[in-house]
Amino acid sequence: MNIHKNARLTPLRREEMALLVIEGAFSKAHAARVYGVSAKIVAR
């Protein structure tokens, strides 16, 4: 997979973030802060 050099999340980190939000461990806002992305990205 070709990942942009400035990408904040790799597919593995994106999956990790999504699972934490789905399982209820993190809110979307908290996940956005921890992973350094916007809440809009987390909502995707």
Image: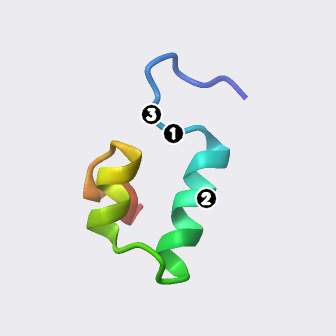
Q: Is there a contact, CB below 8 Å, between mark 1 and mark 3?
A: yes
Observer-nearest of 43 and 19: 19
Which residue is at a point 46% across and 28% down the rendered structure image? Answer: 7
Residue at label 3? 8
Tell me: 35 left or right of 5: left
Residue at label 2? 16
28 above or below 10? below
- Badge 3 density bin: few <14, some 14–19, many ≥20, Cα 10 Å: few
Tell me: 6 left or right of 12: left
28 above or below 38? below
Q: Quadrant of the N terminus?
A: top right
Which residue is at a point 47% across and 73% down the rendered structure image? Answer: 21
- Badge 2 density bin: few <14, some 14–19, many ≥20, Cα 10 Å: few
Q: Name the image quarter holding residue 23.
A: bottom right
Q: How many marks?
A: 3
For the residue labelled by badge 2, is the local secondary structure a helix, a strand or a loop? Answer: helix
For the residue labelled by badge 3, is the local secondary structure a helix, a strand or a loop? Answer: loop
Q: Quadrant of the C terminus?
A: bottom left
Image coords of residue 3 (percent x, y): 60, 25
Query: Looking at numbered disc 2 in the image, what kind of residue is underneath it?
Result: Glu
| Mark 2 → mark 1, Cα distance in angstroms | 10 Å
23 above or below 2? below
Which residue is at a point 53% across and 65% down the rendered structure image? Answer: 18
Query: Looking at numbered disc 3 in the image, what kind of residue is underneath it?
Result: Arg
| Mark 2 → mark 3, Cα distance in angstroms | 13 Å
Query: Looking at numbered disc 1 in the image, what kind of residue is underneath it?
Result: Leu
Residue at label 1? 9
